[in-house]
Image: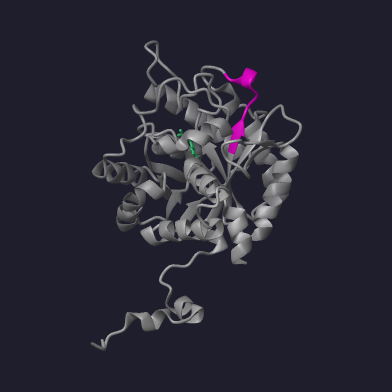
Amino acid sequence: MAPVIRPRRLRTSAAMRRLVAETTLAPSDLVLPMFVADGIDAPREITSMPGVVQHTLDSLRKAADEAVRAGVGGLMLFGVPAAGDKDAVGSGADDPDGVLNRALSELRSDLGDRTVLMADTCLDEFTDHGHCGVLDESGRVDNDATLERYVSMSLAQARSGAHLLGPSGMMDGQVAAIREALDAEGFTDTGILAYAAKYASAFYGPFREAVGSSLQGDRRTYQQDGANRIEALREVRLDLDEGADIVMVKPAMSYLDIVRDVAEISDVPVAAYQISGEYSMITAAAERGWIDRDAAILESLTSIRRAGAKIILTYWAAEVAARLG
Ligand code: PBG
């Protein structure tokens, strides 16, 4: 009746559990995505993401400073141009006076190298049709014409002071095109955090509100099909060959198997993005009293780390960094 082997012995106290924990979370693992909007004079709540706002330049600077003080590993910036400033080619993306590039310059001069400043390198926030690239006459996203726009956008972001660029449009050859352009202009220290395996996901829903996107159609001709695993590994290998400094899997929680697989083949750090819908699901359930908010947040982040991600992009980065101390 009495077992000799008792695994429960290692769970007898909080101190014992802490001693034997295989996975730990540090503030420096967490990256805070932030939205900065043009043409607003006070921070604006994003209804579908309670607790997350579109910042003004001023409120962004303050929130960024607080997040850095809390110890986050970095900041990932998204720009939201005024609705009237969007056009077919996303001109605001490579305009040095565009909202994202202005925000990058300000934060870089405020924070210098005290944090790692990242920028979303993608056109969807800036195009009036909401796609991540430019369209050809038939309305399809034109891969190679889009690469030219990404190159121009990347150079603008590098000049504005971004340490890492995050191409998230899933165009073929995007990492190589950006790397070549950065090097040609002398930005050899500007790195690329490649959204290497990015799936077409229903969980991006709240993000559309966050960036005021009016997407027509869907992204299934460029983002990956959730049915595929081997394809993700191919995408990651290509990005590694093209010079990615960090590879990311996105979304995180419905794709933890992919995070694990990528961690096994990657010789650069692996990141995962706990996206808007994942944030909103936990927030909504907690607001109804259905789950314990703080415990659910930590459990979700721990599972992403355990799957193999070193770096986690999460809208809770500053809060959790402060909690972890
Ligand atoms: C593309 C981009 C998206 C997200 C990050 N970068 C939207 C998309 O691809 O549809 C989603 C982030 C989130 O949902 O939290 N610029």
| 121 sits left or right of 251 in the view | right
Residue at x 76% of width, y 31% of height: 41
Where residue 31 appears, as percent x and y from the top left, is: 55, 52
The x, y position of residue 61, in whole percent, is: 72, 45
Residue that lies at the very extreme toward the top in this rendered image = 137
Query: Of 204 and 235, which appears nearest the observer?
Result: 204
Q: Position of residue 315 (x, y in %)?
A: 56, 48
Q: Quadrant of the N terminus?
A: bottom left
Q: Residue at x 48, y 34 (%)?
A: 205
Viewer-nearest residue: 147 or 290 = 290
Figure quadrant of the C terminus? bottom right
Percent coordinates x, y for residue 218 in the rendering = 40, 25
Specify the quadrant of the image occupied by residue 198: top left
- The image quadrant that residue 265 belongs to is bottom left
| Quadrant in the rendering for residue 8 | bottom left
Q: Is residue 185 above or below residue 67?
A: above
Identify whether 270 is placed above or below 149: below
What span is colored magenta in the figure? 78-86
Q: Is residue 69 positioned above or below 202 on the image?
A: below
